[in-house]
Each structure stands twice: as structure tokens, then as C-alpha cells.
């Protein structure tokens, strides 16, 4: 149950950077990807013995970075981002 709630929190943290630029389906996909990354990040840090009792890094930083990166490829067309090249240009900006 803890992992499910943590994944939900990670999903919400991941969609925050792109909340005004992606549609609902893309937001759900970004949340799912970030929740998975967060889960494996927490497992990795526990295995390495990192002392992060509340998994703050895995629940906030990892999903936030994933959300930032995935905003560019999932950016909605209504924001005048009409080609793959310009979407990846957003990532560089």
C-alpha cells in the first residue's frame, strides 16, 4: 500500500512541470512513467544504503526530472509545437 501511495505522489510531482502544456492522456502516461522510475529509484537507494528514510529524493526529485524531460515530447500541438524537431528543441531550452 505504501508503494501505491508513493507512486501516486510521484505521479503528481512529475506532472507539475508540464501541467499547462500536456493533455490528460499524456499527463497520465508521464505520471505512470515517473511513478515507475520513482519506485526503482527508491529500491536502488535502499540497496546502496543511502539514508533517505522518507524517500524524499525518490519521491520529489526523480519524478520532477522525469516530468521536465517528458514535457517536451508530449507537449500539446495547441502550443504551436508542430514538429518533432521543435519539440526536442524545447528540451534544450
Image (cartoon, grey):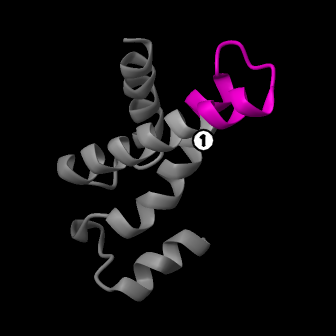
**Residue 3 lies in the magenta stretch:** no
- Helix or strand or loop: what does disc 1 sit on? helix
On the picture, is 60 further left or further right than 74?
A: right
Q: Quadrant for residue 28, please give it.
A: top left
Quadrant assignment for the C terminus: bottom right
Is the stretch drawn in magenta largely helix, strand or loop? helix
Across and down, in percent, residue 54 comes to: 65, 14
**Res. 81 visible in picture:** yes
On the picture, is 23 further left or further right than 2?
A: left
Residue underneath mark 1? 62
Q: Quadrant for residue 36, please give it.
A: top left
Q: Which is more toward the observer, 39 or 88?
A: 39
- What residue is rendered at 60% in x and 74% in y? 92
- What residue is rendered at 50% in x and 72% in y? 90
Whether residue 92 is situated above or below residue 43 in the rendered picture: below
Quadrant assignment for the N terminus: top left
**Residue 47 lies in the magenta stretch:** yes
Whether residue 86 is situated above or below residue 92 in the rendered picture: below
- What residue is rendered at 39% in x and 34% in y? 11
Whether residue 30 is situated above or below residue 75 in the rendered picture: above
Q: Which is more toward the observer, 14 or 7?
A: 7
Q: Which is more toward the observer, 92 or 46?
A: 46
Q: Counting other residues with Cα less than 10 Å from the Cα at mark 1, is it few (<14), some (14-19), or many (20 or more)? A: many
Across and down, in percent, residue 86 comes to: 43, 83
**Res. 19 visible in picture:** no
**Highlighted magenta segment, given as a residue range:** 42-60
Across and down, in percent, residue 39 comes to: 50, 34
Amino acid at each position: 500500500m505504501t508503494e501505491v501511495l508513493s507512486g501516486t505522489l510521484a505521479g503528481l510531482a512529475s506532472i507539475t512541470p508540464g501541467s499547462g502544456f500536456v493533455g490528460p492522456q499524456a499527463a497520465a502516461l508521464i505520471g505512470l512513467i515517473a511513478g515507475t522510475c520513482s519506485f526503482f529509484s527508491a529500491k536502488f537507494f535502499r540497496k546502496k544504503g543511502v539514508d533517505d528514510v522518507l524517500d524524499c529524493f525518490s519521491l520529489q526529485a526523480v519524478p520532477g526530472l522525469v516530468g521536465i524531460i517528458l514535457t517536451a515530447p508530449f507537449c500539446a500541438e495547441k502550443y504551436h509545437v508542430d514538429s518533432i524537431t521543435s519539440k526536442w528543441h524545447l528540451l534544450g531550452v
